[in-house]
Amino acid sequence: MALARAFRVLYRILVDYCSNCSLAGVGYIAARKYHWTERLFWIACVLLAWAGSYLLIKTYMELFRSDAVSIVVENLNTRKDITSFPSVGVCEMGYTKQQYDALQQVIEGLRTTEEMEYNYDVEEFMLRLIYHNLYNYGSIKSYCAMYANCSDCIKCPVTGYAGFSAAVRATCEQLFDQCSWNGKVFDCCRYFRPIQTTMGSCFLLNSIQAVEKYGPRWLRMDLGMASSKGELLLNFSRATTAYVQNEEDIPHMLLTTLQFNQMAEGYAGKIFITLQNIVNDPLVRTVQKNIRRCVFPDEETDFGYRKYSYSVCVTECLRTAQIKTCNCCHHNMLLGKNDKSPVCGYEGLNCLDQRDLMFPQTTIMQPWRTNGLVCDCYPSCTEHEIRIIGRESEMESRSGRSVLIKLMALPTQRYRRQIVRENIDVVVSIGGILGLFTGASILSLVEFIYFFTVRFGSYVVTEIKEEGDAEEDTSEDESAAKG
């Protein structure tokens, strides 16, 4: 009884809604005064209109997801706009012609008896673990396997590589001789701050990964019309690699485009660069990262570093691959005392060596590759374009090395990342499509809710009352018949 009543009420409300709703064409379907062929015609028209609106909305949403952001070029006002000199990273390199007293002391400490002779193969093995540029594929076992069963010789250590690396690599004071910005000398180790990378311990200048931007350890290297000259001169006492990079980047073994080596004594290099900045409209953050195809530095903080960057993501990708493949990672991947990642011993390093994960090929970053590891990393949204337009080098009769990084000219243009379609545009466009094809509006939604809530309840009450009245009339008729 109750189920039959519900179906009757639902049928009545559906007919009432179709007869009175504001959707185009629906009223003709419910009107019984029209011939069934006319009503069938309007059913076909309504279905075609709704199908057309669905296809248009689907196409628009696909376009919104794939083309919501554009990058344009805009001119700069060179009199007012300020340009910041790029960040610089410096990492010590291994140099076979250099003597490492600290390493010799480490190997001497591996003696178990006084009669043991110094083992130069163990020294070569340690150099290749401490300095990544000296590593070559297959070098883990080649220097150590012959001494595995030797009882009267120094053997390769099987653990503790992170401690050996810290003992041998140069400190900031040992690495830098002098630093100057536009001819003015500054304290190198006050502004070059240490950080752990795939290249080992490095030192970064004006990096948001190491210091607070414009804080006490941030060297102001802003350039404008008043100070258009931009020259950074760095003098080193040991072989080094210098990186010109964005403030959110870190040095990485796979990113070698802006990498410059100063190895031999007396080496003096000059690097001439240009810079083109990028700025983002505030609404860019409202778009998902897979649509804008970039990530802001403060959006991802699960990588062990303070800020996100492409180089940070690739570093984490390589470490994850090492742990997944060999159940441990290279000691250079440890990001501090609180990092609990499993560190490889001798067997773990041999595993990395055999699987080419110690110093993998740059194809690791090409997503169209099907073999090997693929790093799915987005660039940073604040990543500026740094270009090398010239390089010079010469040898001088001195013991140190130096590199001069010079910004050749202030940029006259910059990139701007902006929104092509905002969220409000989606609402307007979908509303326009529905209005054009079906006559729908926001009031159509209110109308639908009203009919199937308030009006539905009213019909239910009316149906119950009519059934009660009918039962009373039936009882009266039966009583009158008996009397």
Image (spheres, rainbow, N blue to C red):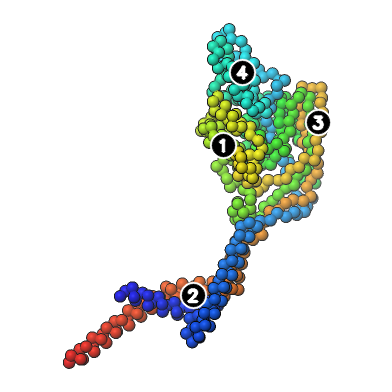
- The quadrant of the rendering that contains the N terminus is bottom left
Specify the amino acid type for callout 2: Glu
Q: Position of residue 334 (x, y in %)?
A: 56, 32
> Which is in the foreground here, disc 3 or disc 1?
1
Q: Quadrant of residue 467?
A: bottom left
Residue at 63% x, 39% y is: 364
- The single residue placed furthest to the top in the displayed view is 115
Answer yes or no: is residue 134 visible.
yes
- The single residue placed furthest to the left in the displayed view is 483
Asked whether, in this view, residue 370 is left or right of residue 341, the answer is right
Q: Earlier in the sequence, mark 4 or mark 3?
A: 4
Specify the amino acid type for callout 3: Ser
Q: Earlier in the sequence, mark 4 or mark 2?
A: 4
Q: Which residue is identified by label 1?
A: 321
Q: Earlier in the sequence, mark 1 or mark 2?
A: 1
Specify the amino acid type for callout 4: Val
Q: Give neighbour class at mark 1: few <14, some 14-19, many 20+ (Cα, 10 Å).
A: many
Q: Are marks 1 and 4 in contact (CB under 8 Å)?
A: no
**Structural distance between the alpha carbons of marks 4 and 3:** 34 Å
**Structural distance between the alpha carbons of marks 4 and 2:** 83 Å
Q: Which residue is identified by label 3?
A: 393
For residue 122, the mark is 4
Q: Give neighbour class at mark 4: few <14, some 14-19, many 20+ (Cα, 10 Å).
A: some
Q: Position of residue 240 (x, y in %)?
A: 71, 28
> Which is in the foreground here, disc 4 or disc 3?
4
Q: Earlier in the sequence, mark 3 or mark 2?
A: 3
Q: 226 or 470, which lies in front? A: 470
Q: 34 or 473, which lies in front? A: 34
Q: Give neighbour class at mark 3: few <14, some 14-19, many 20+ (Cα, 10 Å).
A: some
For residue 447, the mark is 2
Residue at 49% x, 83% y is: 36
> Which is in the foreground here, disc 4 or disc 2?
4
